[in-house]
Image: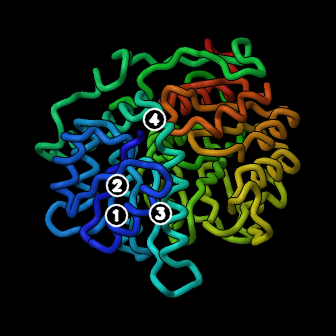
Amino acid sequence: MTRVLVVDDSKFMRTVIGNALEEAGYEVERAEDGATGVERAAAIDPDVVTMDVEMPGMDGIDAVERIMATNPTPILMLSVHTEEGTTATLDALERGAADFLHKPDGSGSRNIAHLTDEVVEAVDDLAAAEVSSMALARAAATAHATRTGRAGAGETTTGNAVAGGSTETQVSDRSAVGPDVPSVGSGSGIDEDTAPVTVDGDTETAPTVVIGASTGGPKLIERLFERLPAALEAKVLVVQHMPPGFTERFAERLDARSGYDVSEAADRERLAPGEAAVAPGGVHLEVASNVGERLRLRLDDGERVHGVRPSIDVTMESVAARVTDPLCGVVMTGMGRDGAAGIEAIDAAGGHTIAQDEATSPVFGIPCQAIETGCVDTVAPADGIADAIVDAFTTDGENDE
């Protein structure tokens, strides 16, 4: 039986969430704070952990870092929907948490029953996550501890944190990709070197890149932006499945970590080379036009697509229809098939397409569905995606297409 550890300082939340998971067929253990959660995780080796963000003593962020550094496990964060809660949740995702939900605050129609249903659904998804991808999160947690000088975050190193111990980045092109899910080589996916990729040779002018992800995406997109070279002078659109309130803070984090000017997308905004826009939570992001190497953006609060808004497909399909500059579409970790139709559209428009590999995807749904279309040119590990983007637009040198 799948075992879930519920960590929350509220007895009410531990009881309600735990009962819902038990009714769904899970074996549930409970812990009342972060320190106890770390101890219980080491003792019982749960398949999934749900973790409150704000707790007395050791909070959820530190607990995530310690668990991921010693016993990689899919962790679902639960946070209050405040500015502080948003920042803390994104910090937890950076340190290895796989996904998050925000608790109802009583201000809208969403209530505790909605939350418990969402928790059960999210745990169902995370229970299928690959152990190898959790090891990548352990590497991320360890790397974060190393960068920040935190003691006691774990004794592992990124050199051997991933099953197989490989640190080589490997990329598979479409010659190895068919309509079935491919078995392709993959490297560690997490590399302590976050320096931007070197651009060797000439590149196409003012390219457009569209990046889509869901579960497990935020920390991997942050690392991608650290490695995406400003010298490429791309226009970048990011669609990360997130609720309203989180995407603005996410854009700020990307801006701080990259050479690109990153912001949450605004209606009628013009996006120039060297700039990136993140789709706001709760609306679809479209490209209305492409004039003079600039993109005119449009926000649309229309119907959800695949149950989500923003939708990767909506953005990619609008880009494929209207962008005349060189184009690349990227799909990364996440549940469902959002992005598959978008990848098909970009391929049909003559753009290059990239999917994250299975070994480095916390949840392989979105990349898998895209690969199965037969329209993916390159399958790459998480830390090889920036290299693959640069290669897609390189017109001179050894990386010629």
Q: Earlier in the sequence, mark 3 or mark 1?
A: 1
* Front label number (4 vs 3): 3
Q: Earlier in the sequence, mark 4 or mark 3?
A: 3
Q: Where is residue 266, by image quadrant?
A: bottom right
**In the image, residue 107 lies at what x, y percent?**
51, 87
The residue indicated by pointer 3 is 101
Tell me if label 3 and label 1 are in contact, CB under 8 Å: no
The residue indicated by pointer 4 is 196
Tell me if label 2 and label 1 are in contact, CB under 8 Å: yes
Q: Earlier in the sequence, mark 1 or mark 4?
A: 1
Image position of 259 (left or right of 292): left
Instruction: Point out which mark residue 168 bears.
Output: none
Residue located 66% across and 18% down the image: 182
**In the image, residue 131 lies at what x, y percent?**
41, 30
* Front label number (1 vs 4): 1
Instruction: Point out which mark residue 92 bears.
Output: 2
Residue located 79% across and 57% down the image: 287
Point out the image quarter for the N terminus.
Answer: top left
Category of crowding for the residue at label 2, using alpha-carbon neighbours closer than 10 angstroms: few (below 14), some (14–19), many (at least 20)? many
Seen from the viewer's position, the closer of residues 261 and 253 is 253
Q: Indicate the amino acid at tag 1.
A: Ala
Q: Real-space Cα distance between discs 4 and 2?
A: 24 Å
